[in-house]
Image (cartoon, rainbow, N blue to C red):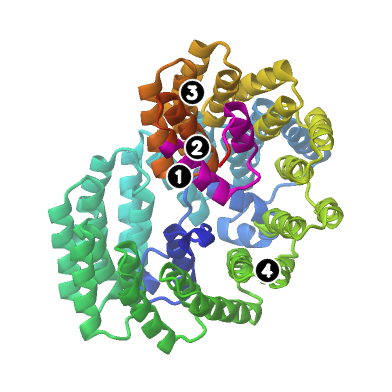
């Protein structure tokens, strides 16, 4: 049953549930790291550019903009600079903006110059523009954030210290915690972690009576590998504010050991049973430790206080799947979708839940139900729209209606070249599986005219070329795949196996398969190829060893056919026939089995 739900991963659980908890903050988290701080000066610049027009009046008031007459000459220069920048130039537009900013004393022009330099990845020019922006608008928090974010990412981090010190000193007592967390967030991006931590240590000295100061120190100590110091600082924060969820979460984080972190969280929950964030973190930690039933109990407790928490519902669905409780999983995912539908402001994509529900329906033989769930992924903006549409077409094809399946593929709306290529690839697979090899070949031949460097199309095209006895074309296509995707082990394996199967260039075939096996040593089909090339080279003992390893990993009929032939040649005909009977029971129409039995004149 577990294999039926390959889409389900622990990372999906952790990410989705963490997202769900964002709106539900503990009492002290309002002053925590959730405060908005630009990830980098470039990100802040992107936001600034988007808001520049709408916030012009606000900027004028906040930055004390000078009264500058927009002369026809200035308008022409600025317009020309913007058009040149749009056409891929940066130096001329940048200089124009910088000169205009210096002449007019308008900080918006300096900001625009910094955006141009950042977009062109010109660090020193960007810093010069940001400095000018700050000089022209010393009260602008946006300019200061740009500056701090930029110098912290360069070798000029020391320039940030007096600014942080001033901001902390001037912050009202109620907002100082936020300022501390903002400082820590910005400094955490520094490449010089040791210097950043020493700066934090100096800056927080006047505020050691605040629990936030110790949390900042704990994070800084952890960043330089001082775990014991980090634990000590987190404990100091808890001593100042014993019911702080943020403090105990920090302590759990810095402990390093999952078992120890679990004890920290469990102990806190005994005294603070309503701590939503801590219980959520504890549940996720239990999942990570594969303690699924206790994790489910914790998520259920969360739902008692927040019955419509979509993250909790999704997490319970994931855990139920891991416990092979498909009925429970189905109920939780349906509730998840129902609650999400009633929350138009929630931006989460229901795609994964819909796919899982479709898989559940498919597993119990309800193809119509599986398709109905996929039909709900009807938004082409959804991250999984194309995947859902392809899966829908595959289910139709599996039902035997090839024409309807191919029609469903033509209805997929996408402008993404990779997705368009994937649609053509699936179309060819439908035709190939239905026995229309030449038609499938033609589809891929035409597809490669549009997407000549798509490795997936080339790989399937090569396999079809081989089936049509176009061996030179097959080899050329596989070598093209190797050039485009050097880590594609399947291309090396396919060419190596083809050579071995034809009994030609066996040393080259061995080298190709060996390289594929180095890339994917646990792949049973590549192990099978290695066994087969050894057999062709006359190394029966090595062939048997490789094929037995492959068959132990996966009892595939084709591997059984190859292993059986090796044993037959070694004289162990009873075991060979036993393997062939097993293969026949799994796949009575297997072509490799039929041809082998006919060639060896064996009847089972």
Choose between 529 and 264: the one closer to the eye: 529
Camera-near label (3 vs 4) is 3
Classify mark 1: residues with Cα within 10 Å, few (<14), some (14-19) or many (20+).
some
Mark before the other along the chain sequence, 4 or 1: 4
User: What residue does disc 1 label?
Assistant: 554
Q: Position of residue 497 (x, y in %)?
A: 56, 24
Instruction: From this view, report whether residue 424 is shown above or below residue 18.
Output: above
Mark before the other along the chain sequence, 2 or 1: 1
Asked if the residue at tag 2 contacts the one at tag 4, i.e. Cβ–Cβ closer than 8 Å, the answer is: no
Camera-near label (4 vs 2) is 2
Classify mark 2: residues with Cα within 10 Å, few (<14), some (14-19) or many (20+).
many
Query: Residue at left 38%, top 36%?
Result: 549
What is the distance, in whole Å, between disc 3 and disc 2 at their CAs? Answer: 16 Å
User: What residue does disc 3 label?
Assistant: 513
Q: Position of residue 276 (x, y in %)?
A: 36, 79
Mark before the other along the chain sequence, 1 or 3: 3
- Res. 176 in view: no
Q: Please report the bounds of the magenta region as a residue range.
A: 574-602
Q: Position of residue 357 (x, y in %)?
A: 60, 70
* Residue 544 occupies quadrant: top left
Please give left or right for residue 74 compared with residue 487 in the image: right
């Amino acid at each position: 049953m577990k294999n039926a739900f390959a889409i389900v991963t622990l990372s999906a659980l952790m990410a989705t549930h963490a997202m769900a908890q964002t709106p539900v903050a503990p009492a002290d988290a309002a002053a925590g790291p959730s405060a908005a701080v630009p990830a980098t000066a470039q990100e802040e610049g992107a936001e600034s550019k988007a808001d520049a027009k709408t916030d012009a009046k606000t900027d004028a008031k906040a930055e004390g903009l000078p009264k500058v007459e927009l002369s026809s000459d200035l308008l022409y220069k600025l317009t020309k600079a913007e058009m040149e920048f749009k056409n891929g130039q940066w130096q001329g537009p940048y200089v124009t903006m910088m000169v205009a900013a210096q002449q007019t004393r308008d900080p918006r022009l300096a900001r625009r110059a910094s955006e141009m330099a950042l977009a062109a990845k010109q660090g020193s020019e960007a810093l010069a523009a940001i400095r000018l922006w700050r000089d022209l608008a010393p009260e602008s928090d946006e300019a200061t954030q740009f500056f701090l974010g930029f110098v912290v990412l360069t070798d000029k981090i020391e320039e940030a210290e007096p600014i942080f010190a001033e901001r902390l000193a001037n912050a009202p007592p109620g907002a100082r915690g936020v300022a501390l967390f903002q400082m820590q967030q910005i400094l955490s991006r520094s490449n010089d972690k040791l210097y950043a931590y020493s700066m934090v240590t100096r800056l927080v000295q006047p505020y050691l009576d605040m629990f936030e100061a110790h949390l900042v120190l704990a994070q800084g100590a952890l960043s330089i590998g001082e775990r014991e110091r980090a634990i000590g600082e987190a404990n100091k924060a808890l001593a100042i504010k014993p019911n702080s969820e943020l403090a105990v979460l920090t302590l759990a984080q810095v402990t390093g050991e999952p078992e120890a972190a679990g004890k920290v969280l469990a102990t806190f929950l005994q005294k603070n049973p309503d701590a939503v964030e801590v219980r959520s973190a504890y549940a996720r930690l239990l999942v990570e430790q594969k303690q699924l039933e206790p994790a489910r109990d914790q998520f259920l407790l969360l739902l008692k206080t927040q019955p419509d928490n979509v993250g909790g519902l999704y997490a319970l669905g994931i855990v139920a799947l891991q416990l092979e409780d498909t009925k429970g999983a189905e109920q939780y995912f349906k509730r998840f979708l129902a609650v999400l539908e009633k929350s138009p402001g929630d931006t989460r994509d229901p795609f994964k839940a819909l796919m899982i529900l479709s898989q559940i329906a498919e597993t119990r033989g309800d193809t119509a139900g599986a398709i109905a769930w996929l039909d709900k992924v009807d938004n082409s903006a959804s991250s999984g729209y194309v995947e859902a549409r392809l899966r829908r077409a595959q289910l139709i094809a599996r039902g035997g209606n090839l024409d309807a399946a191919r029609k469903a593929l033509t209805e997929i709306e996408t402008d993404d070249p990779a997705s368009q290529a994937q649609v053509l690839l699936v179309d060819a697979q439908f035709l190939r599986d239905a026995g229309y090899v030449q038609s499938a070949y033609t589809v891929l031949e035409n597809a490669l005219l549009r997407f000549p460097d798509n490795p997936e199309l080339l790989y399937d095209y090569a396999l079809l070329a081989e089936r049509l006895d176009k061996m030179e074309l097959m080899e050329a296509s596989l070598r093209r795949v190797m050039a485009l995707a050097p880590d594609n082990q399947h291309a090396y394996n396919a060419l190596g196996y083809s050579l071995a199967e034809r009994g030609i260039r066996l040393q080259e075939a061995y080298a190709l398969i060996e390289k594929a096996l180095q890339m994917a040593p646990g792949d049973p089909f590549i192990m099978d190829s290695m066994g087969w090339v050894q057999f062709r080279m006359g190394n029966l003992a090595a062939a048997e060893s490789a094929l037995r390893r492959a068959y132990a990993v996966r009892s595939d009929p084709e591997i059984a056919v190859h292993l059986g032939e090796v044993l037959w040649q070694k004289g162990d005909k009873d075991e060979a026939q036993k393997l062939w009977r097993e293969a026949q029971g799994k796949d009575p129409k297997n072509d490799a089995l039929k041809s082998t039995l006919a060639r060896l004149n064996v009847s089972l």
